[in-house]
Amino acid sequence: MLTSQWARWRFEKTLAALSRTPIAALQHYAAQQWPTPDCPLDEAPLLALDFELDGLRRGAHLLQAGWLPFSGQTLSLANAVSRDIRSAATLDPRAVTIHGIGEQRAARGESIDTVLADLIEALGGRVMVAHAAAIEREALQGAVRKLFGAHLPIRQICTLTLEQRLEPGLRSTDAYRLMACRQRYGLPEYTAHDALTDALAAAELFQAQLTRLAPDITLAQIENA
């Protein structure tokens, strides 16, 4: 309880600092109404997010972002977003093999500040949902820090961590990968390594995981600060 209270205080303090920045997207983010800890988990405002990156090293280039606002009760593709992000870098060929975004495609993407501004606005007032959510959180916070010189506080739910809670002790090295988790719930197999497809896959997985949680569970009981 003390840990969650400290996390909420830190989140609110950082939001207050963001409200004083000259960046409109960050001001908008700070001004949103955020769900309270006692919000029923299936009613909480959420946003599934996935990035395709030029590898997993620190500071890897963001090449694609996909996001989808949803809740535990509803999921619609009407507001789904997929955006390629411009990069002039020499890309890691191993990463290109995985996500298929080569240097020519990366050169045609949108500017990262434009994509980030739209993503930050969409994420305002919502809890991020992602599989291995630390990757998305650190990538987004790193990009915001580099571009805007500010720290973006992010509330998150990690579907991988939640699956480990629901299915502890699985020994296969692939047991907690996104598609392996989906298979346990009878969800369809998607082609991986497209940002929006992976964001949708995480959102659907979360909704399936909800069916195995207590009906009166609250956001505070599952959210990773």
Image (spheres, rainbow, N blue to C red):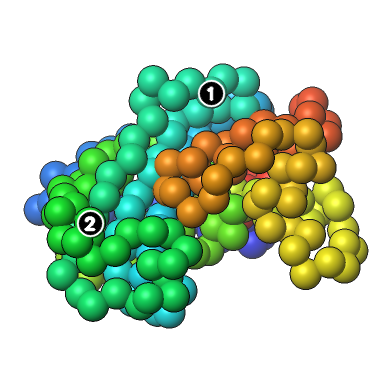
For residue 87, which quarter of the picture? Answer: bottom left
- The residue sitting at 29% across, 63% down in the picture is 102
> Could you tell me residue 225's position as x and y percent?
56, 56
On the image, numbered disc 2 is attached to which residue?
105
Q: Is residue 172 left or right of residue 47?
A: right
| Secondary-structure class at tag 2 | helix
- The residue sitting at 44% across, 49% down in the picture is 194
- Residue 62: give its label: none
Q: Is residue 206 left or right of residue 136?
A: right
- The residue sitting at 43% across, 48% down in the picture is 195
In this view, the residue in front, 50 or 154, is: 50
For residue 111, which quarter of the picture? Answer: bottom left
Count the labels in the image.
Answer: 2
> Could you tell me residue 190's position as x and y percent?
59, 41
Mark 1 neighbour density, 10 Å: few (under 14) some (14–19) many (20 or more):
some
Q: Is residue 136 left or right of residue 20?
A: right
| Secondary-structure class at tag 1 | loop
Q: Is residue 113 left or right of residue 176?
A: left
Q: Nearer the viewer, mark 1 or mark 2?
A: 2
- Residue 75: give its label: 1
In this view, the residue in front, 96 or 167, is: 96
In this view, the residue in front, 50 or 101, is: 101
Q: In the image, is residue 45 above or below residue 198? A: above
In this view, the residue in front, 9 or 181, is: 181
> Could you tell me residue 99's position as x and y percent?
43, 59
Q: Is residue 137 visible?
A: no
Residue type pointed to by label 2: Arg
Classify the position of the N terminus by image quarter.
Answer: bottom right
Q: Is residue 31 visible?
A: yes
